Amino acid sequence: MPYTYEYPRPAVTVDCILFGFDDGELKVLLIQRASDPFKGLWAFPGGFLDMEDPTIEFAAKRELEEETGLKEVFMEQLYTFGDVGRDPRGRTVSVAYYALVKLSDYLLQAGSDADQAHWFNISQVPALAFDHAKILQMALERLKGKVRYQPIGFELLPQKFTLSELQHLYETVLEKPLDKRNFRKKILKMNLLKPLEEMQAGVAHRAARLYQFDKQRYEELKSRGFNFEI
């Protein structure tokens, strides 16, 4: 005989907030909803937790792949949203995850519950369904805080980059200018960048040296108590 609950149970959903960096702009991945509620509006990839999903994170990755074609994306839990009225279908609690990805590493395609999947510049995000505008704002604030104290910004850059590209990334995420001399002095003093015997190609201005992030070096320093801070 099935167990019956004394109290009604809310539905559980997952939402995936993916950030990318391309053409000097911070971007966020959105899907256009193919069904009601909010049919035609843009939202984060996500959906309902299935009883067969072994974990909530598994559900998030499943929904992300079903709606965008993206898989093998490492995501971190952001927050749990459960305000009354956030979903017109009934009481719904959503566990949100966020991730930083290199756009060039993934092939994007709309899936089962989406008419379209598209990367939007943060400055040009359309009206969002549900409470996803609130979720996006929290994800951006988390990103701003974390990018200053962990080298996650390198996840958004190509494998080889210039110091100017690195500084522009941080200025874009933090939404403020950084002093060029101080930024370069601080980042080079950390000894986390490997200078390459390569220069920029195909640029109109003087070509700059290319660098790579030394992840192994960072892990070694972190194990000895090193604190990354921009």
Image: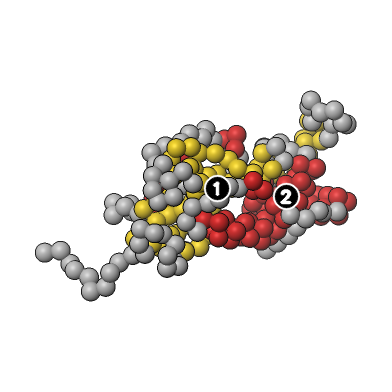
Q: Is residue 197 left or right of residue 87?
A: right
Q: Is residue 197 left or right of residue 21?
A: right
**Residue 123: horizontal and vertical position, in percent?**
67, 48
N-terminal of the two: label 2 or label 1? Answer: 1
Task: Determine the residue positioned at 76% across, 41% down.
Answer: 165
Residue 120: name its quadrant: top right
Res 52 visible: yes
- Amino acid type at image mark 2: Thr
Q: Quadrant of the N terminus?
A: bottom left
Task: Determine the residue positioned at 60% across, 47% down.
Answer: 125
In the depicted view, which residue is nearer to us: 189 or 65?
65
Q: Residue furthest left?
A: 1
Task: Determine the residue positioned at 40% across, 63% down.
Answer: 93
- Which numbered circle lies on residue 5? none
Residue 227: name its quadrant: bottom right
The residue singled out by tag 1 in the image is 18
User: Height in image: 192 above or below 118?
Assistant: below
Res 76 visible: no
Q: Residues within 10 Å of mark 2 (few under 14, many from 20)?
A: some
**Residue 100: horizontal and vertical position, in percent?**
59, 47
Q: CA distance from mark 2 to mark 1?
A: 16 Å
**Residue 158: horizontal and vertical position, in percent?**
67, 37
- Amino acid type at image mark 1: Leu
Secondary structure beneath label 2: helix
Task: Determine the residue positioned at 78% across, 47% down.
Answer: 167
User: Height in image: 151 above or below 162?
Assistant: below
Secondary structure beneath label 1: strand
The residue singled out by tag 2 in the image is 172
